[in-house]
């Protein structure tokens, strides 16, 4: 018996890399898979048949799967993606928002088109697909799971990725808010922050000569968050880098209180108290 027997799982950006590993992992545990991918280059240009190839691979392994070539960054595409799942399998249960592109450039050289394209696919795409998916879950009577994809770049920042890190940080905020709002519908919303060598990252210096940061290391985290093993846990960010699994949390420090002058700080006092204000 699999962890997600007969569950209908949508994976965006599943034509290769981490998304393909997610699709294969869920399928091995009994899920019916909707493989979404435009099939373009890593900067979002063009289209192709990547989704079809993964569907063929899944079917050859005995899984039920259908392809979607919808654009997750458009309302029509997000709606069509959910409709594809319902038409093929009658319902939806799990959404893994994985689709993404890269257009890296240093902040001073970043142009508006680079900004918009990356933010649209990552942040807007996650919003649109999650909203259409959650509406379908509510129509079904509630219950389901959403797994978003943020990034270490989104949580900590990274040189040359002001567009990507902003989108991924936005996904963290969206995950937190959705987890609060959708609890009453029994929908859990969590995120993963993966570090893996894929087509999108293989030319980065940190991945040169590295074979221990694979998409197969990432997939079990999405499977956990998308299965009943997750329980009612919601609003978390699970990070995976090879053999290491850890969590990101936003914390607030104890800070300092001012007991004079009606509690109004001066800029000079903040400067003088800086170390104690920021100490965790």
Image (spheres, rainbow, N blue to C red):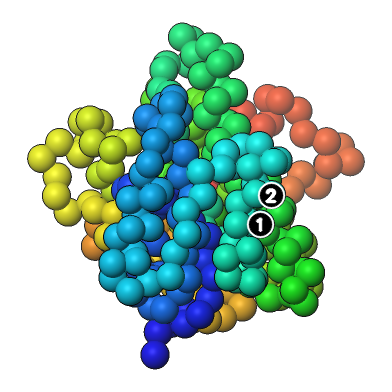
Q: Is residue 244 visible?
A: no
Tell me the residue at 55%/25% (across/down).
117
Q: 46 or 20: nearer the eye?
A: 46
Q: Position of residue 41 (x, y in %)?
A: 37, 30
Q: In the orientation shown, which residue stands out farthest toward the bottom?
A: 1
Tell me the residue at 48%/10% (across/down).
108
Question: Image quarter for residue 57?
Answer: bottom left
Helix, strand or loop under label 2: helix
Compared with 115, 204 (above or below) is below
Q: Which residue is mark 2?
A: 79
Query: In the visual, does 229 lie left or right of 172?
Result: left
Tell me the residue at 59%/23% (across/down).
116
Q: Position of residue 257 (x, y in %)?
A: 74, 48
Helix, strand or loop under label 1: helix
Q: 273 or 18: nearer the eye?
A: 18
Q: Position of residue 177 (x, y in %)?
A: 71, 55
Q: Is residue 59 visible?
A: yes
Q: Position of residue 158 (x, y in %)?
A: 41, 31
The mark found on residue 83 in the picture is: 1
Q: Are marks 2 and 1 in contact (CB under 8 Å)?
A: yes
């Amino acid at each position: 018996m699999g962890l997600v027997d007969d569950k209908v799982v949508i994976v965006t950006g599943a034509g290769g890399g981490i998304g393909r590993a997610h699709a294969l992992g869920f399928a091995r545990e009994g899920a019916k898979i909707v493989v979404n991918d435009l099939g373009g280059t890593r900067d979002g240009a063009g289209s192709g048949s990547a989704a079809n190839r993964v569907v063929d691979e899944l079917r050859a392994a005995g899984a039920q799967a259908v392809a979607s070539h919808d654009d997750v960054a458009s309302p029509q595409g997000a709606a069509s993606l959910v409709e594809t799942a319902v038409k093929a399998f009658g319902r939806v249960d799990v959404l893994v928002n994985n689709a993404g592109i890269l257009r890296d450039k240093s902040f001073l050289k970043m142009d508006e088109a680079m900004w918009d394209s990356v933010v649209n696919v990552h942040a807007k795409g996650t919003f649109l697909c999650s909203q259409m998916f959650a509406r379908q879950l509510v129509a079904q009577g509630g219950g389901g799971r959403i797994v978003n994809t943020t990034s270490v770049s989104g949580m900590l920042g990274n040189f040359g990725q002001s567009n990507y890190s902003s989108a991924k940080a936005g996904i963290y905020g969206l995950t937190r808010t959705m987890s609060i709002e959708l609890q009453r519908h029994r929908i859990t919303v969590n995120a993963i922050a993966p570090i893996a060598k894929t087509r999108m990252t293989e030319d980065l210096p940190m991945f040169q000569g590295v074979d221990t940061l694979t998409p197969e290391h990432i997939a079990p985290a999405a499977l956990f968050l998308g299965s009943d093993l997750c329980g009612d846990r919601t609003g978390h960010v699970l990070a995976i880098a090879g053999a290491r699994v850890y969590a990101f949390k936003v914390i607030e420090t104890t800070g300092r209180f001012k007991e004079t002058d009606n509690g109004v700080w001066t800029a000079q006092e903040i400067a003088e108290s800086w170390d104690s204000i920021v100490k965790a």
